[in-house]
Image (tube, rainbow, N blue to C red):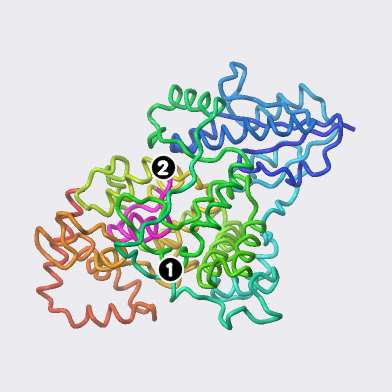
Amino acid sequence: MTTLRIVLGDQLTRSLASLRDYQRGDTVLMMEVVEEATYVKHHKQKMVLIFSAMRHFADELSRQGCSVDYVRLDDPTNTGSFTTEVQRAIARHMPTRILATEPGEWRVLEMMKGWGAEILSDDRFFATPASFAAWALGRKQLRMEFFYRDMRRLSGLLMEGDDPVGGQWNFDHDNRKALPKDVIPPNRRRFEPDAMSREVMEMVAARFPDHFGELEPFGWAVTRDDALEALDHFISHCLPRFGDYQDAMKQGNTFLYHSVISPYLNIGLLTPREICNRAQEAWSRGDAPLNAVEGFIRQILGWREYVRGLYWLKMPAYGASNFLEAHRPLPAFYWSGKTDMNCMAQAIGDTQRHAYAHHIQRLMVTGNFALLAGLEPTEVEQWYLLVYADAFEWVELPNTHGMALFADGGVMASKPYAASGAYIDRMSDYCDGCRFKPEVKLGPKACPFNYLYWDFLIRNEAKLKSNPRMAMPYRTLAKMEAERKADIVRHAGKFLAAL
């Protein structure tokens, strides 16, 4: 019996279910296909990261004695799609059995069902889609906080018996500090591209010149050893202050104290359990405070597992909703970064240069603007999917559709994450030197986030006023004079029309 073992570009884990019992005579199939590179125009660095990591992983498997059938994107016989490449591989190897690990995206699962493969559960996660569905059954609200507490109990992470260490589940209130001017984050561990990565970079530059983003400087890890080194650097140099400053933003400093390991986690070079264990060990040694370690573990054990569960629970219809009836086209500056709003220019510029922005830039700057301006969800979601190195639909869609845009009407978030310029000013230095002023509410010098915030509330009052968590802003709006409201709507309308 010979087995064809299929490994996708986000499954670069030696303990993957479809690799685990490899036998001599089996073949591992890995495929670079143009269909996956172009269904959205992925950031150039994202494509280099995935293709180079795949090639390095294939080399590692070969060194370990595995027979690898690797289809390169630039192979002239490459047919360009997963399905036809699987069919060609079957014809080449005539396997008696085909094994695949369940993919991360709905559309790929639909393809995979036609391959004649035995589809194995992806047990690299803490929770399965089935266990999440069982947790969700009968619940009126699917709130991450309650799921996270159950995951803490099941995993044993940061637990003392049945109780959370420190006597509370969540230290988020301790993690909302702006970065003081005298605090300088450490330089991050980046990795010089080797010959294999340079070859991929040349291929991407030649074949996808019109894709988003800059190719240089490319500094991502493309091997497990380098990914582990990046994790070590974060645990030692950044985790102790991650909690305090995880919501901060600073001009000219993309990474701050964030882990910057999500691309490695999402393509399989690192696993969630080993990352959480490393963070917990740092707390146990006294090397990192509880608020930092809990906040970090919550992002992986809580948010990451929660959005995956929600994605598989609600697909394929989830992305079709548009609760706030937002239909404005995505502005051109999301692609160019050329805008007088310095916060947007900084967040988009970081994304262009590094295929990365941290979660507050994504949620409270680019996402907040998209929410306030009423941008079409499908266009915003496509942008988020293609611009970030860590973006795969299972994690991107719920975070953007539900959290940033409230397009699901509250399935994911209990309220829209709408904010005025005051929030951005409080958490960043972006407003320094911006032509718009966060303290000015109307007029040519006013921060657009200010009047867009109130215009958003006015525009969506019928849908949002009954939300208990929106009671305070709507009480303020109720006290506002009609003339003031009219000025806000006029300013917002003029600004949005100019987009």
Q: Nearer the viewer, mark 2 or mark 1?
A: 1
Quarter of the image that includes the N terminus: top right
Q: Which mark is residue 354?
A: 2
In the image, is residue 132 part of the stretch drawn in magenta?
Answer: no
- Please identify the dominant SS of the magenta region: helix
Disc 2 to disc 1, how far (Cα)? Answer: 24 Å
Classify residue 487 as left or right of residue 39. left
Few, some or many residues within 10 Å of mark 2 (<14, 14–19, 20+): many
In the image, is residue 365 part of the stretch drawn in magenta?
Answer: yes
The secondary element bearing badge 1 is classed as: helix
Q: Residue at x 60, y 61 (%)?
A: 305
Residue span colored magenta:
356-378
Measuring from the top left, give residue 167's x and y in whole percent: 58, 83
User: Circle 1 sits on which residue?
Assistant: 244
The secondary element bearing badge 2 is classed as: helix
Mark 2 and mark 1 lie on one chain; the one further toward the N terminus is 1
Q: Residue at x 55, y 58 (%)?
A: 235
User: Which residue is at the front of the view, 113 or 40?
Assistant: 40
Classify residue 390 as left or right of residue 77. left
Q: Amino acid at mark 2?
A: His
